[in-house]
Amino acid sequence: NCQKTMTDSKTSGLPEADPSDWPEAWLIPDEVEDQYALNKLEPNVPVSVEDLKKIGISYWKMDAESYEYPTKSVPWDPKDAMDPKLNQLRDDRGYSYADIITVHPDHLPDFENKLKAFFEEHIHDAEEIRYILGGSGFFDVRDQEDKWVRVHIKKGDLMTLPEGIYHRFTCDDKHLIHAMRLFKGVPVWTPFNRPCDDHESRKKYVESFPPVTEGKQLQEAA
Ligand code: KMT
């Protein structure tokens, strides 16, 4: 019965997108010269939806065409949402706060420094929820082998990163992303830059999504 309850709670609410609708993801090198470029390995190493789920990422495909949102609204009341899918996610997951920002040199004061901060590897002590209303960008997340996975998000994508996952963000070469940032409760955007392995949120993450070393995988495959 416990199993049934767990299954029910996992499958309740708005179902996540079909794998074919998820954003494209691939491995990138540890060091990149141009953060705005795709930085695919040669040959490209795609990362599957299954692997993204294994590190705690969730994803919903939204209808960003049919509803209008301001370029900037800090805050933006999620109760004002007209989109029934957004309403359902808000209610299912308890998103009580939102704001809307546009990351672009003309719309974000101190663009250069903000982007620098976004691109420092960090964690948060809460889930990170981003609904992309326009434009595109890259979320880089660490996989279970501590390799960088680059996720290309664009208009209509609603993605969540679990509390404690090491990640960073950058615009792509279009330098424009319009996004809704959702939050449960009073928003805290504080980044804790790596290394912060002793942070409670990091410890909690590592417990839920234990690291897999390459050696161990090879052993298991043998
Ligand atoms: C973040 O947390 O890095 C951001 O909010 C970046 C802009 S939203 C895609």
Image (cartoon, rainbow, N blue to C red):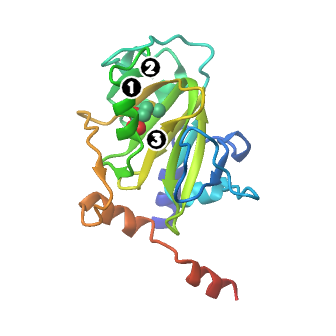
Reply above or below: 23 against 48: above
Q: Quick one: SS at disc 1?
A: helix
- Identify the image quadrant of the C terminus: bottom right
Q: Who's the residue at 63% across and 16% down the image?
A: 65
In three-dimensional space, the C-alpha distance between marks 3 and 1, rounded to whole angstroms, equals: 13 Å
Q: How crowded is mark 3: few (under 14 residues within 10 Å), some or many (20 or more)?
A: many
Residue 92 is at least partly visible in this image: no
**Nearer the camera: disc 2 or disc 3:** 2
Amino acid at dot 3: Phe
First reached walking from the N terminus: tag 3 or tag 1: 1
Q: Position of residue 54 (x, y in %)?
A: 55, 61
Label 3 CB sits under 8 Å from any ligand 1 atom: yes
- Which residue is under mark 3? 169
Q: Which of marks 2 and 3 is nearer the N terminus?
A: 2
The residues tagged by marks 2 and 3 sit, at their Cα atoms, a distance apart of: 16 Å
Does the CB distance between marks 2 and 1 fall below 8 Å?
Answer: yes
Q: Label 2 to label 1, Cα distance in Å?
A: 5 Å
Dot 1 amino acid type:
Phe
Q: Name the residue under label 2.
A: 105
Please state which of residues 74 and 29 is positioned toward the viewer in this rendering: 29
In the rendering, at what x and y percent does residue 162 appear? 42, 51
What residue does disc 1 label? Answer: 111
Dot 2 falls on a residue whose secondary structure is loop
Q: Quadrant of residue 188?
A: top left
Q: Left of 35 or right of it: where is 186?
A: left
Amino acid bearing label 2: Pro
